[in-house]
Amino acid sequence: MHLARAGSFGAKARLAGLTEVFETAGASVMQVRLLEDHRVRAVDVLRPGLSAVLAGETVPEAMAWSHRSVMAHLDSVHPDVVLCMTARAYHPELRRGPWHVVLDYVDRLSDSYRDRARILGRTPKATAFAALAATARRFERSRSRTEVTAIAAGWSDAKALGAEWIPITEHLAPPIADTAPEHDVLFLGKLSYPPNVEAIERLAAMWPALQRRRPGTTALLAGANPRPAELALARKLGWSVQADFEDLDRVIASARLGAVPLVHASGIQTKILTAAARGLAQVVDPVATAGFAPGFPLRLAEGNDAFVEATADLLDDQHARRELGDAARDHVNDTYSATRWAPWARGLLGRVGSSGRP
């Protein structure tokens, strides 16, 4: 079950990954699009919606869809397992059914909202995000879901939430050739997302030092919805921007090196996983690695000076780039493939059985 909004690249990757994991385990998977097919009604909000939010049993966003409509639908299709993708897709009434509920936190929603509030400063939108962070934190700390299987995509998030770590999975793609790329540095991600905007601004602040260290270095920003401010910044610095593209492999292959200078990050960074699956070496701030299990092959660089040096060093050393990219690609295949996690799904389905209860 998911909200079925347009969603970020990460949300789409999580949905596709979990679907493949369960299908690889032999399950038949049906999607429930909550906002499209189960519109909220006044009775859903009045009872038990508000009281459940106040008790920390759900989050306010779960009142945007009708749990009564969903329950009726589930009663008609008789699933063994109901997987709620994010806290926004979970309601405590779901536990009343004969199925087993899996709550996929994905990441700590409270941290994501808190970071957005910090980035936006003293604005009405920041105040709203701060309020949502508080309700999400109350939900995450609740201990009223002992009969629910909790999972999370981020390594550190799973540990903090007391959940099982089931990461976003990724398909391997043909490795990049790295013979004559059009660009030196690639920043990949939704270009209007506040943490990404902040990372782009940080890259811009480091750009003069990188040009002194390695004159003529070029960059590509690739992702949806660039704002006028980011487009103007790119023009000023001579960066290329690719907002709409059909071939992600071609975009990644057009650069020598990935750069991920995030200042705030939550959950598993799909931009890192996607580039690694294609063999692209990456320089990453450690703040962006909390979602991964230890040992992910990346060049870590904390602080602007270290980031500039690591970027320049790898751009000047094709052999080191290739070794790092190949190691990252192998690591994705070993740890972040659907095949790797299908036994977990198979075990869950085996425990649940036909009764819907483990």
Image: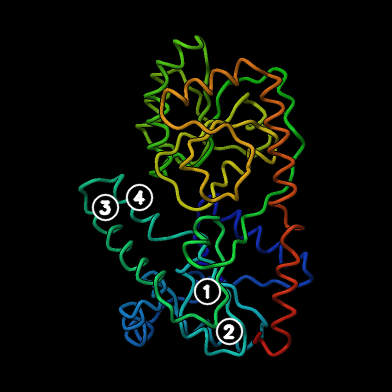
Q: Amino acid at mark 4?
A: Asp
Asked if the residue at tag 3 contacts the one at tag 4, i.e. Cβ–Cβ closer than 8 Å, the answer is no
Tag nearer the camera, 4 or 2: 4
Q: Tell me, for residue 73, which label it has, or none.
A: 2
Label 2 residue SS: helix
Q: Residues within 10 Å of mark 1 (few under 14, many from 20)?
A: some
Q: Quadrant of the N terminus?
A: bottom right
- Across and down, in percent, residue 106 comes to 52, 61
Residue at 36% of width from left, 81% of height from top?
A: 52
Asked if the residue at tag 2 contacts the one at tag 1, i.e. Cβ–Cβ closer than 8 Å, the answer is yes
| Residue identified by numbered label 3 | 126
Label 4 residue SS: helix
Q: Quadrant of residue 127?
A: bottom left
Q: Amino acid at mark 1?
A: Asp
Residue at 39% of width from left, 38% of height from top?
A: 197
Asked if the residue at tag 2 contacts the one at tag 4, i.e. Cβ–Cβ closer than 8 Å, the answer is no
| Residue identified by numbered label 1 | 37
Depth check: 144 or 92 in front? 144
Q: Residues within 10 Å of mark 3 (few under 14, many from 20)?
A: some
